[in-house]
Image (spheres, helix red, strand yellow):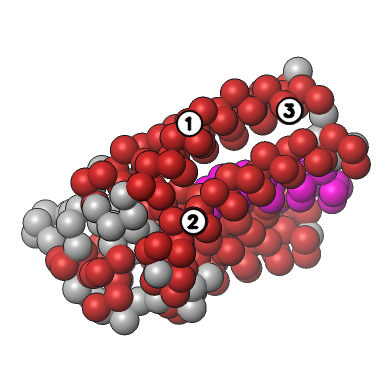
Amino acid sequence: NDYWDYKRGIDIATKRTKFSGGTGVLPENLLKPRTVYLAGLVFLILGAAIGSYFIAIRGVTIAIILGFAVIAIYFYSTRIVNAGLGELFVAIKGAMIVLGTLYVQNAVLEPTALYVGAIVGILSATVLFINSFPDYEADKSKGRRTLVIILGKEVASTTFPMFIIAAYALIAGGIFFGLTKVYCLISFVSIPLAVKSALSLRKHPQSIDNIVPAMASTVTYSRITGFLLALSYIL
């Protein structure tokens, strides 16, 4: 992501925040672009190699999940984000991580794993969505088409709560289908943070400095909700 955003001039044009704008290693000349690109490929190959071991012991199901992961990772910062599908792929990734982890351990495909994974994916997609706001001008000027660019900042700010509502609705609704448990409702503790994020973004969708607190509370909301959701299954 750092490599492609630098090559396209996005990380040079955007104002970097604690949560967006890349790591800054390339704009600040701390590393060379080719070094970053090769490092990314090496880690991708290492990850695929580890995944190949699980293919050998668990079969074609892991091969499908691994294949999706490799393709999504490599093309994420170019074609996937350009098509406005970043949030969708991140949500799918969450589902695949949980489903794949269960399958590696137990060699079974459980609807519950896919369902809970989708919730985790939505939480990650929520963070990605709000983190796209500060990069709006830079992304748009360099030809990138994130979901925020497609919708526009004003519409996107009113769309943001839908991500939050979807996560909570799936947690609560899953109880009636036996896919989540009543213990999962402890994750609703994060609602104040979610409300704070939505209200703050709606009030300041154009100001990068004022969006940063909304980004911070969204990251915290996502982590707390995901952690408590996982904890509820342990309970």
Image-based side of 190 in relation to 208, left or right? right
Residue under pointer 1: 193
Picture quarter with the C terminus: top right
Front of the two marks 3 and 1: 1
Q: x, y percentage for residue 123?
A: 56, 45
Looking at the image, is mark 2 or mark 1 earlier in the sequence? 2
Q: Name the residue type under label 1.
A: Leu
- On the image, which quarter does residue 129 sit in? bottom left
Q: Nearer the viewer, residue 100 or 157?
A: 157
Q: Residue at x 66, y 48 (%)?
A: 166
Picture quarter with the N terminus: bottom left
Q: Nearer the viewer, residue 18 or 45?
A: 18
Q: x, y percentage for residue 101?
A: 69, 44
Q: Name the residue type under label 2.
A: Thr
Q: Residue at x 31, y 38 (%)?
A: 213
Q: Which mark is residue 43?
A: none
Q: Main secondary structure of the magenta part?
A: helix
Q: Is residue 72 above or below residue 165?
A: below
Structural distance between the alpha carbons of marks 3 and 1: 17 Å
Tell me the crowding category of disc 3: few under 14, some 14 to 19, or many 20 or more residues within 10 angstroms, Cα based.
many
Q: Secondary structure at mark 1?
A: helix
Q: Secondary structure at mark 3?
A: helix
Residue under pointer 3: 184
Residue under pointer 2: 158
Looking at the image, is mark 3 or mark 1 earlier in the sequence? 3
Q: Which residues are magenta?
A: 100-125
Q: Residue at x 43, y 41 (%)?
A: 199
Tell me the crowding category of disc 2: few under 14, some 14 to 19, or many 20 or more residues within 10 angstroms, Cα based.
some
Structural distance between the alpha carbons of marks 3 and 2: 27 Å
> In this rendering, does residue 73 appear at all?
no
